[in-house]
Image (cartoon, rainbow, N blue to C red):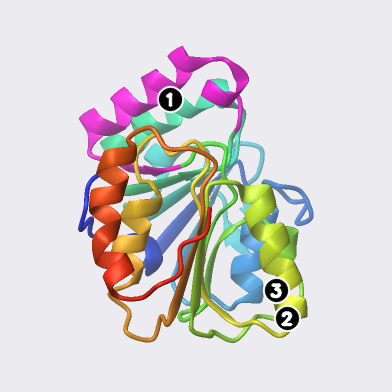
Amino acid sequence: MSLNVGLDRLFKPRNIAIVGASSNLDSISGRPLKLLMRYKYKGGIFPVNPKYDSLHGFTCYPDVRSLPVSPDVVIVGVRASLVPGILEQCAEKKVPFAVIFSSGFAEADDPYLQERIVSIAKEGGIRLVGPNCQGLVNFVDGIPLSFSASLDDEPLEPGNIAYISQSGAFGFASFALSVDSGVKFRYVVTTGNQVDLDAVDFGQYIIQDEEVKLLILYLEGLQDGPSFSSSSKGLVRKKFLWQF
């Protein structure tokens, strides 16, 4: 946990790479591209998969090293064993953020693999979202960094509610139910295993947006309760609602 983390390039990336991008836009690895197109993302989109030369009108690259730019965000949607090598390439390209959808780390009783990606990220200066998460959405700027089927309908208008959930499945399921009831969100973030950026990091960043009137936080557990309590005092003073 590190407070006051600068997350502008994560929430408002100029370029996004999708590692493991698929021609099947309804698959987990294909949906990020589908959603970015649906929300008419205006930045650069760089699919990465050695199987393709192009995907849905975009040039597809064999690996992160071959990208013509250093993306602000790399979305990782491949099997867990490949993630360390991808992060090593991200470090070479000086990528600041990686959103890791992949599961098979500590939640699957493989703490070594999780420790390895944390070590690579720290050494390479990469901030991690996840792994084992469903990503995040900035509805203000129309930037979905997610594969959630909850985003399949027409692009949603931003509201005044921010929602941060450790659980991707519960987070986006409850998000979908709320949207069906007419609730409008400004940001939705799922944090997964929280090997680096955690719920408090995102909360501290999101409340800087004066249009956020309600912050909802769903936690499944805390590794450092006292630190969380201390860090969250400023949020409570702003009269936000925290739910557990």
Secondary structure under the numbered disc 2 in the rendered image? loop
Q: Which residues are magenta?
A: 103-129
Of the two numbered discs 1 and 3 on the same chain, state the one appearing first in sequence.
Answer: 1
Residue type, mark 1 in image: Gly
Q: Quadrant of residue 94?
A: top left
Secondary structure of the residue carrying tag 1 is helix
Q: CA distance from mark 1 to mark 3?
A: 38 Å
Q: Is residue 89 visible?
A: yes
Q: Residue at x 32, y 79 (%)?
A: 209
Coordinates of residue 147 in the picture (x, y in percent): 65, 55
Residue under label 1: 85
Q: Nearer the viewer, mark 2 or mark 3?
A: 3
From the image, tell me which residue sits under label 2: 154
Q: Is residue 216 above or below residue 142?
A: above
Residue occupying the point 29% across, 36% down? 91
- Asked whether, in this view, residue 208 is left or right of residue 16, the answer is left
According to the image, label 3 marks what residue? 178
User: Which residue corresponds to the image point at 40% horizontal and 51% vertical from the top-left?
Assistant: 199
Say what amino acid the circle numbered 3 marks.
Ser
The number of callouts visible is 3
